[in-house]
Image (spheres, grey):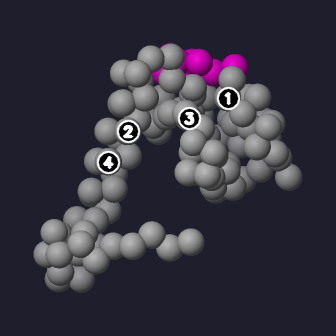
């Protein structure tokens, strides 16, 4: 099993959006499935506050500027809102009401 340190070491070689690494390539280098890689990255961001950026188009990278980090934040916000909209439509609960009912699970 790959460690946080191994993942951070590989990401340190990919500074800036132009130097991103795809999930497929990063997972292969760590010898983990892509799903496990995404879980590891999520944990690093949520639990450790790691500044890992990326989108499907750019791959994962360490942001070289505040603008690159902001681009990733905007990507996540858009994705989250899109998923909430789908949940709203499926459940028949208005989006604002549904958002007010949300709680993070541990």
Which SS class for mark 4? helix
Q: Earlier in the sequence, mark 2 or mark 1?
A: 1
Q: Position of residue 99 (x, y in %)?
A: 25, 69
Q: Position of residue 1 (x, y in %)?
A: 85, 52
Rate crowding at label 4 as few (under 14), some (14 to 19) or many (20 or more) other CA atoms within 10 Å: few
Mark 4 — residue?
77
Residue ID at (57%, 42%): 49
Rounded to the nearest angstrom, the CA distance separating label 1 from label 3 is 8 Å
Asked if disc 1 and disc 3 are in contact, CB closer than 8 Å, the reply is yes
Residue ID at (29%, 48%): 78
Rounded to the nearest angstrom, the CA distance separating label 2 from label 4 is 6 Å
With respect to residue 33, does 8 lie above or below? above
Mark 1 — residue?
11
Q: Can the viewer see residue 38?
A: no
37 displayed left or right of 78: right
Which quarter of the figure has residue 98? bottom left
Residue found farthest to the right: 1
With respect to residue 89, does 28 lie above or below? above
Mark 2 — residue?
73
Quadrant (top left/top right/bottom left/bottom right) for the C terminus: bottom right
Q: Tell me if residue 104 is in the magenta stretch.
A: no
Q: Earlier in the sequence, mark 1 or mark 3?
A: 1
Which SS class for mark 1? helix
Could you tell me what secondary structure mostly forms the magenta stretch? loop
Which SS class for mark 3? loop
């Amino acid at each position: 099993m790959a460690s946080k340190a191994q993942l951070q070491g590989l990401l340190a070689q990919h500074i800036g959006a132009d130097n991103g690494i795809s999930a497929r390539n990063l997972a292969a280098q760590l010898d983990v499935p892509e799903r496990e890689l995404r879980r590891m990255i999520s944990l690093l961001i949520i639990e450790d506050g790691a500044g890992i950026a990326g989108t499907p188009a750019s791959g994962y990278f360490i942001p070289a500027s505040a603008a690159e980090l902001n681009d990733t934040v905007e990507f996540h916000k858009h994705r989250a809102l899109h998923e909430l909209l789908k949940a709203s439509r499926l459940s028949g609960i208005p989006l604002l009401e549904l958002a007010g009912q949300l709680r993070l699970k541990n």
